[in-house]
Amino acid sequence: MNQYVFLLLYVSCLFSFSVSAAPGPEPSFITSDTHVAKPVSIMPGNFHSGLQKVCSATDEPVDCIQLLSPLMTDRTAVDPISILRVGIEATNQKVKEALDKANIIMKDPSTTPEYGEILWTCVKNFEDIIDSDQKAMEAITKHNANHIIEELSADSASVSPCEDELEAANIQSPVRDIVKSIHKTISINLAIAAVQVHF
């Protein structure tokens, strides 16, 4: 009888041990950064920081980065002269955009002679900007800082007559937003050239 009781106790202990040792579901762990969005850079970090440094010395650092960064690649140097070249190219792209829009409207049969004449003034002034920018690029190659500033200042003088004549004729400018960007890039380029370009 005692042996029978002992055997029952022994089997009961074994069963209890096996149940307690059975593996349960593996715990799940949530790392602290599971729901943290990682910042995405629009360009390699070293280029972005270099552009930011140059743009911070202008009056419009945010616009500077937004307007110039799309034209930069991983091969673009981040010194002020290289970024000035990018800024001049940014101006040219916006000017060509304005030229295309003005030419389309001028060819439209519904455009009045007065409107067409004003747009012709715009086209000529936009072409002057492209010409001045080409000369500014040549001045960079020749390390002529004064000439760079002269040509970029000519850009500033050429961009205003178009909007002024449209406003005087009480005509809403079809290139108003583009011209705003042109103004900004010219201002940025002048700031870089005047303060940061040294040969």
Image (cartoon, rainbow, N blue to C red):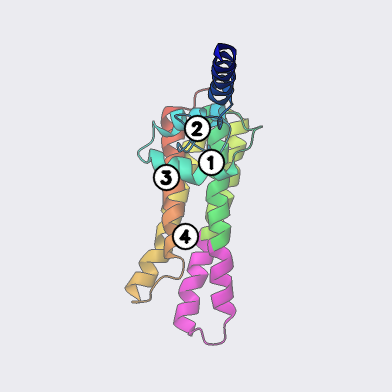
In the image, which residues are magenta? 98-125
Work out how far the residue at label 4 is from the one at label 2, CA to CA, in angstroms.
23 Å
What number is the disc on residue 178? 4
Up-down relation of residue 112 to residue 151 (above or below):
below
* Side of 153 relative to 88 (left or right): left
Task: Decide if residue 94 is in sight here.
Answer: yes
Upstream in the sequence, badge 1 or badge 4?
1
* Residue 114 rendering spot, x and y as whole percentages: 45, 81
Residue toward you, 90 or 159: 90
Work out how far the residue at label 2 is from the one at label 3, CA to CA, in angstroms.
12 Å
Upstream in the sequence, badge 3 or badge 4?
3
Name the amino acid type tagged 2: Leu
Mark 1 crowdedness (10 Å alpha carbons): few <14, some 14-19, many ≥20: many
Q: Report which quarter residue 180 is drawn in.
A: bottom left
Up-down relation of residue 83 to residue 127 (above or below):
above
Q: Nearer the viewer, mark 4 or mark 2?
A: 2
Q: What residue is pinned by disc 3?
A: 63
Whether the residues at callouts 1 and 2 have beta carbons within 8 Å, the answer is yes
Upstream in the sequence, badge 1 or badge 2?
2
Name the amino acid type tagged 4: Ile
Q: Main secondary structure of the magenta part?
A: helix
* Residue 88 rendering spot, x and y as whole percentages: 54, 43
Mark 3 crowdedness (10 Å alpha carbons): few <14, some 14-19, many ≥20: some
Name the amino acid type tagged 3: Asp
